[in-house]
Each structure stands twice: as structure tokens, then as C-alpha cells.
Amino acid sequence: MNSNNHPMELDLGQKHIITQRRYEALGAINDFFIAVWFLIGSFFFLSDALVESGTWLFIVGSAQLLIKPVLKLISLIHVKKIYDQKQNANK
């Protein structure tokens, strides 16, 4: 279908797909490490000697939760720039 027929459709091409997949991969890696920090931190809470280390892992995991929306915002900005570049090239 032609994007002129559907104003909500954006044809950004291969560059868009590559960019989007890179951000999705970064998000998946980030999510993986968040899960690792919280899982290890949970086990650390089973030992009184490791409670402080477990708390630090929870703090790191919690701080890392901020990365997900930041990645999403950066991705949206990046895709918008790709769209603008394509629009300017088509003029």
C-alpha cells in the first residue's frame, strides 16, 4: 500500500528497521541485566553477610530501570530524524 493513501503509515525503509532492531536489542540486553541484578540480589538477602551487597544490586537494578524509557525516547528521536531526512531527500 502507498503511504499517501494512509497518512498514519510511514515508509522509512531498511534504515528504519535496522535502527529499530538495534534499540530493541539494547533494550533486551538492559532487561536481561536488570533481571540478573535482582535475582542475585534476592539470593544475597538469604545471607546476613551479603545483605548490603544485595541492597546495592537492587539499587543498580532500579537505576537501570531508568534506561528503558531513555532508550525508547532516543529511539523515537532517531527514527524521527530518519523520517525527516527521507522527507527532505524526496523533495
Image (cartoon, rainbow, N blue to C red):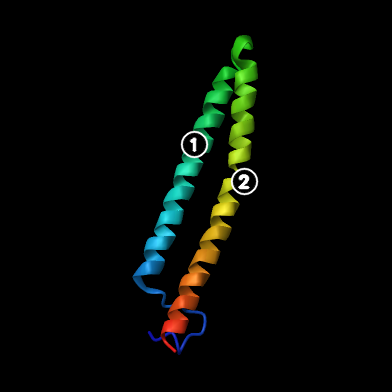
> Left or right: where does residue 73 sit relative to residue 3?
right
Q: Residue 33's mark?
A: 1
Residue 68 location (% of width, % of height): 56, 49
What residue do we see at 50% from left, 77% from top? 84
Residue 74 location (% of width, % of height): 55, 59
Is residue 48 shown above or below 75? above
**Which one is nearer the viewer's eye here, 45 or 19?**
19
> Left or right: where does residue 69 sit relative to residue 30?
right
What residue do we see at 54% from left, 53% from top? 71
Is residue 5 shown above or below 23? below
In the current view of this chain or complex, which residue is farthest to the left? 14
Under mark 1, the amino acid is Phe
The quadrant the N terminus occupies is bottom left
Q: Earlier in the sequence, mark 2 or mark 1?
A: 1
Is residue 15 shown above or below 70? below
**Which one is nearer the viewer's eye here, 26 or 84?**
84
**Which one is nearer the viewer's eye here, 47 or 81?**
81
Under mark 2, the amino acid is Leu
Q: CA distance from mark 2 to mark 1?
A: 13 Å
Question: Which SS class for mark 1?
Answer: helix
Residue 9 location (% of width, % of height): 47, 79
Which residue position holds label 2? 66
Is residue 79 shown above or below 53? below
Residue 14, image quadrant: bottom left
What residue do we see at 49% from left, 43% from top? 30
Count of residue discs: 2
The quadrant the C terminus occupies is bottom left
> Left or right: where does residue 14 sit relative to residue 26?
left
Rate crowding at label 1 as few (under 14), some (14 to 19) or many (20 or more) other CA atoms within 10 Å: some
Rate crowding at label 2 as few (under 14), some (14 to 19) or many (20 or more) other CA atoms within 10 Å: few
